[in-house]
Image (tube, rainbow, N blue to C red):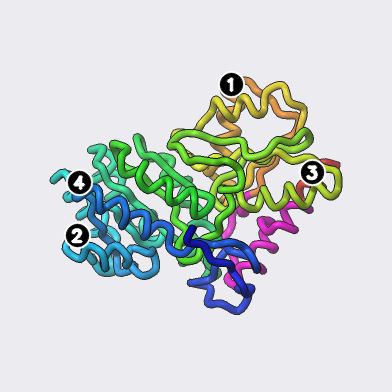
């Protein structure tokens, strides 16, 4: 297994390239880029297209392997999405990469009208989702899920770790229709291989059981939830974790089954604003199915323009670090 260990804390690392991996954590380098290169060897219809960010989305590996199938569109996300749509119309399967803020905010109308309305086979893989960079509101895509959830027919993926990404790449390529995937790049933590886990589009998976708290999570917040479950176990607090890597379509059946008839605190943990993300999607599902948890809390990012700074500091400030999330859950249990 191609795996490295994160040896140093990232406190002083540039906010743009900071890793979410903690000291001593297992990581895999560029899982997206490597998985796409491997898949493209089997499928000549796959092309890579980016908005001047190949190196920073791991698409440079694809460009090196298949230069004749790689397209550099420059710093123009609207052109990126429009061109990807045109390629899809010609029977290609474009993987379009950029940063999540630019791919959603700048190019939203092109995604909506050019790609989604015609159900084109474009795979948008966007890095720096939520609070994964410390560069402040200009680069923190804290509302991308809220925007993209409103687009009809769009599949939305929020993978947790390197394993999730590796397994998601061939599945989203095989999926007919547009996909938006939040992308972790560089040295990506590896955690789900310890839980007999496999990624499936549209499916949520119970990673561990617990009688007092249920954390429903997506993205790297599933990693945080598993860490918190270990922390709270020392305080005799039993925490279950339900990982939801597909935000749309949401696996409502798995969520209802995990919540119904169980008297425990339900916490939605997400690397996204509490407005319009996984938390509100789960709350809507529970309400429509007339399922009432014993208690319900959102552990997402505040409805605000967030500060700039080192990621460990910001994660603690906004309640999504291991220590902060454990503290919040203990307070909610009182």
Of residues 223 and 97, the one nearer the viewer is 223
Is 276 placed left or right of 228 in the picture? left
**CA separation, marks 1 and 3?**
24 Å
Of discs 2 and 3, which sits in the foreground? 2
The mark lying in front, picked from 3 and 4, is: 4
Question: Looking at the image, is mark 3 or mark 4 earlier in the sequence?
Answer: 4
Q: Residue 134: x percent and y percent?
A: 55, 69
Q: Where on the picture, by quarter, is residue 263?
A: top right
Q: Which residue lies furthest to the front in this view?
A: 1
The reply to whether discs 2 and 1 touch (Cβ–Cβ < 8 Å) is: no
Queried whether the magenta region covers residue 67, the answer comes back as no
Report how far apart the C-alphas of labels 2 and 4 lie in the structure.
Answer: 13 Å
> Who comes first in sequence, dot 2 or dot 4?
2
Q: Mark 2 points at which residue?
A: 69
User: Alpha-carbon neighbours of circle 3 within 10 Å: few (<14), some, or many (≥20)?
Assistant: few
How many numbered marks are there?
4
Q: What element carries label 1?
A: loop
Q: Which of marks 2 and 1 is in front?
A: 2
């Amino acid at each position: 297994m191609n795996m490295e260990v994160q040896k140093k804390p990232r406190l002083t690392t540039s906010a743009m390239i900071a890793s979410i991996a903690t000291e001593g954590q297992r990581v895999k380098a560029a899982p997206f880029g490597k998985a796409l290169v491997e898949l493209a060897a089997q499928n000549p219809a796959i092309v890579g297209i980016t908005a001047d960010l190949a190196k920073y989305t791991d698409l440079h590996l694809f460009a090196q392997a298949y230069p004749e199938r790689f397209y550099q569109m420059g710093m123009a996300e609207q052109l990126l999405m429009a061109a990807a749509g045109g390629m899809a119309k010609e029977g290609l399967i474009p993987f379009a990469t950029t940063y999540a803020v630019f791919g959603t905010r700048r190019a939203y109308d092109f995604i909506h009208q050019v790609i989604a309305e015609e159900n084109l086979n474009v795979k948008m893989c966007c890095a720096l989702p939520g609070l994964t960079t410390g560069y402040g509101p200009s680069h923190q895509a804290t509302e991308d899920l809220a925007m993209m959830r409103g687009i009809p027919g769009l599949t939305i993926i929020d993978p947790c770790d390197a394993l999730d990404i590796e397994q998601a790449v061939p599945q989203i390529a095989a999926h007919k229709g547009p996909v938006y995937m939040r992308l972790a790049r560089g040295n990506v933590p590896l955690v789900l291989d310890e839980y007999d886990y496999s990624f499936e589009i549209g499916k949520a998976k119970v990673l561990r059981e617990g009688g007092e708290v249920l954390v429903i999570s997506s993205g790297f917040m599933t990693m945080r939830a598993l860490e918190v479950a270990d922390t709270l176990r020392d305080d005799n607090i039993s925490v279950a974790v339900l990982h939801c890597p597909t935000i749309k379509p949401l696996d409502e059946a798995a969520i209802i089954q995990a919540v119904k008839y169980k008297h425990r605190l339900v916490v939605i943990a997400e690397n996204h604003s509490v407005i319009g993300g996984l938390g509100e999607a789960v709350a809507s599902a529970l309400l429509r199915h007339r399922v009432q948890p014993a208690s319900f809390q959102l552990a997402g990012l505040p409805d605000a323009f967030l500060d700039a700074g080192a990621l460990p500091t910001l994660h603690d400030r906004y309640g999504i670090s291991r220590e902060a999330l454990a503290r919040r859950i203990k307070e909610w249990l009182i």
